Image (cartoon, rainbow, N blue to C red):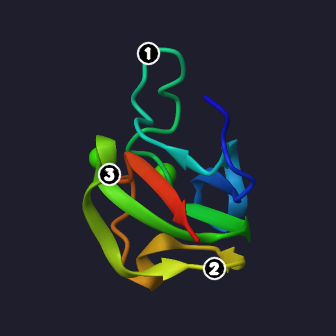
Amino acid sequence: MSHRNEHIIVFEHKEFRGRHRHIFGYEANLNDAEDNSLNDRISSFVVLSGDWTVFRHANFVEPVGGRTFGPGQYAWVEDYNVPNDAISSLRATG
Ligand SMILES: [Ca+2]
Ligand SMILES: [Ca+2]
């Protein structure tokens, strides 16, 4: 399956520290056995393109934050009403 071009980088710790992953278009399950290194660990992210929704559970269940996140830097998720170390899936719209 080809992913779209929307681009976000998610980080293990606040202020863009720790491990990170590039995600394009969507990630339905951060807990996938192939790479679960950031499931329930994301504390900051940078949106390069797209408007992203983040979810507490895999398969886009239970959106958190009450908004979408457009291009910009989000240095600490709890400043945006997103619970720390909780995101398990995310996707871009538009
Ligand atoms: Ca973390
Ligand atoms: Ca979760």
Q: Amino acid at mark 3?
A: Phe
Looking at numbered disc 1 in the image, what kind of residue is underneath it? Ala
C-alpha span from label 3 to label 1: 17 Å
Residue at 40% from the left image edge and 35% from the top image edge? 29
Residue drawn at (54%, 73%), measured in percent from left and top?
76
Q: Position of residue 67 (x, y in %)?
A: 41, 83
Q: Secondary structure at mark 3?
A: helix
Name the one closer to the observer, 52 or 36.
Answer: 52
Q: Is disc 2 placed on a helix, strand or loop? A: loop
**Mark 2 is on which residue type?**
Gly
In the rendered image, which quarter contains the N terminus?
A: top right
Q: Nearer the viewer, residue 34 or 26?
A: 26
Question: What is the C-alpha distance between the residues marked 1 and 2?
Answer: 29 Å
Cβ of mark 2 under 8 A from ligand 1: no
Residue 43 shows in this picture: no
Residue reaching furthest top?
34
Residue 60's label in the rendered image is 3
Which residue is the site of mark 1? 33
Residue depicted at 34% across the width and 58% down the height: 55
The residue identified by callout 2 is 70
Residue 38 shows in the view: yes
Where residue 8 sits, quadrant-wise, is bottom right
Query: Which of these two is toward me, 55 or 42?
Result: 55
Task: Where is residue 73? Give x, y as percent.
Answer: 70, 76
Taking 66 as reference, is 53 above or below it? Answer: above
